[in-house]
Image (cartoon, rainbow, N blue to C red):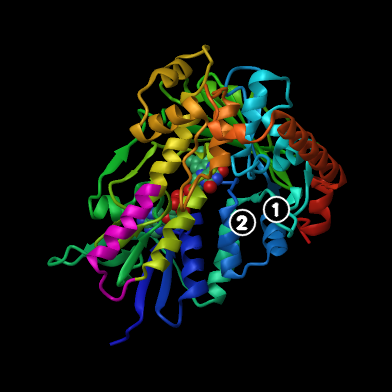
Amino acid sequence: MSKKIKIVVLGGGTAGWMSAAALAGVATDKVCEVVLIESEEIGTVGVGEATIPAIKEFNDRLGIPEPEMMRKTRATFKLGIEFVDWGEKGTSYIHPFGTYGKTIAGTDFHQHWLRLAKAHQVPPLEAFSFAVNACRAGKFDFPAENKTAVNAAYSYAYHFDAGLYARYLRDFSERKGVKRQEGKVVQVQTSPDSGHVHSLLLESGEKIIGDYFIDCSGFRSLLLGETLGVSFESWKHWLACDSAVAVASERGAFFPPYTRATAKGAGWQWRIPLQHRTGNGYVYSSDIISNDEATISLLSGLDEPAITEPRTLRFEAGKRACAWDKNCIAVGLSGGFLEPLESTSIYLIQIAIINFLKLMPGKVADPRVIREYNRLIDLEYERVRDFLILHYHLNRRDDSVLWRYCQRMAVPDSLREKIELFGRRGYIEQYRHGLFAPPSWLGVYMGQGLMPENVEPLVGVVTEERVRDELSGLKAAIDRKVAQMQDHEAFIAGYCPAGT
Ligand SMILES: Cc1cc2nc3c(=O)[nH]c(=O)nc-3n(C[C@H](O)[C@H](O)[C@H](O)COP(=O)(O)OP(=O)(O)OC[C@H]3O[C@@H](n4cnc5c(N)ncnc54)[C@H](O)[C@@H]3O)c2cc1C
């Protein structure tokens, strides 16, 4: 009997093809064979256009050439997300993929900035973020290799057409030996003794047997949810938006290296610039407005004319009680969904499949491996959840039921403690692994208007005068470097123009 494990991936959306590509990129022919089943008739969710910097690690690990991938997916660069009207109406801040300043005498930069800001006029904190300045100027370049340089303190992600990305990964996977099977699964057969998934029966009558089944069947969660009965844990009481309407519009003259998320009465609207079009959508709570009202609001808030028909999607924030049960692992929407505010879904797919590779089982998985996998995935989901809730909870808007509810709702203890620690003394917990690093929390705390009451006593080690000098030197260095960068659009035209 072959020692190779047979892995069946059900679903050819972003999750299915990312899973297949990762397995094929590092494991096929040596430890496993991979079959992917997808049904064109069912189709994919096909939204998902914004990513976070971790995607670059994923692509690099697979050996995917960046300019080629960007050309084929019509991608642009992303240095952060602009949040408009989130703290309160009329405000805007950027959550950058990068740090704010540098530590001074071993103490975090923001503590020194706070100390000065409490007593004097100082430029806003975001003036000391290289990535924010590049965003505001509409510029792009790669981070400097010299890690101490002012223009090294950031990373980047992409805006891309996720359908084209899945297509790209399909070609990649097939070249590496993944077998693709077109067909609809009409029955899932389980072993009577173990309850494990044994095989998938296709409409054509063909039966696909496997050792492991990666469930990438989308919201339906055909294997983990429907077949194995793993329950769905709803987080709707914290993340109330349960619907979205999406539409593409013409590519605009405004071509920024960042996503824009504008808070509205019943949720928020995204704007994602690709090379050939702009992606737009309104994520909202259906308890507050109807689909028709949301569609009208979305269309009237576009910067450019729409080029597709608006499409409505329903979802619920939350996750399955566990991501891995028996011989089935849910990746993507079948395992859970947290709304796209911080573009984390593709990251959650990536982390699911990378952790699976890290804990790659033999023909039969050790229960301890499964427990560890589930612990890692739960942690990621909870951290993303808390970070998302933060944006809603720390609002000072008074214009709708949604925003008032979010201000008052009881948040998870894990988040409440973080907010209190920051509010008292500007402290931010540093995770050893996973999302999100302190600058991200800092960006959102400050952007939403939470000013710490006190600063760390250790800032007193240096004089205010020295801090002022450091701040003005840093700002001048950032301004100088940003001025030398190319416009984002020109950079794309030279590096990865679509259609070439
Ligand atoms: C409004 C919205 C905006 C989003 N924006 C972002 C974003 O900006 N960034 C981001 O990272 N993510 C985003 N996402 C999430 C992203 O769309 C998904 O994480 C991603 O598309 C993965 O989907 P999936 O592959 O799990 O499921 P799907 O795309 O639904 O794919 C399911 C697959 O399963 C197959 N299938 C299902 N049942 C069967 C069957 N019986 N037989 C055979 N095949 C079957 C289908 O054919 C399909 O191939 C967004 C999601 C929504 C709802």
Q: Tag 2: Cα neighbours inside 10 Å, few (<14), some, or many (≥20)?
A: some
Q: Residue 302: where, in percent of width, then height? A: 68, 28
Residue at the spot x=13%, y=65% of the render? 192
Q: Residue furthest top?
A: 398
Above or below, 356 relative to 497: below
The residue carrying mark 1 is 74
Magenta highlight on residue 367 = yes
**Mark 1 and 2 residues: CB-CB less than 8 Å, in contact?**
yes
**Amino acid beneath label 1:** Arg
Seen at 42% across and 38% down, the residue is 385
Question: Which residue shows up at 61% across the image and 58% down it?
Answer: 56
Residue 49 percent coordinates (x, y)? 60, 46
Question: Which image quarter holds the C terminus?
Answer: bottom right
Magenta region, residue range: 361-379
Compared with 68, 277 (above or below) is above
Which element is circle 2 on? Answer: helix
Which numbered disc, 1 or 2, marks the residue that appears first in the sequence?
1
Q: Amino acid at mark 2?
A: Leu
Image quadrant for the N terminus?
bottom left
Image vertical order of residue 400 relative to residue 434, above or below: above
Q: Which residue is mark 2?
A: 164
**Label 1 within 8 A of ligand 1 by Cβ:** no
Q: Work out whether residue 271 or residue 164 is closer to the camera in this orientation and state it.
A: 271
Q: Position of residue 181 (x, y in %)?
A: 44, 69
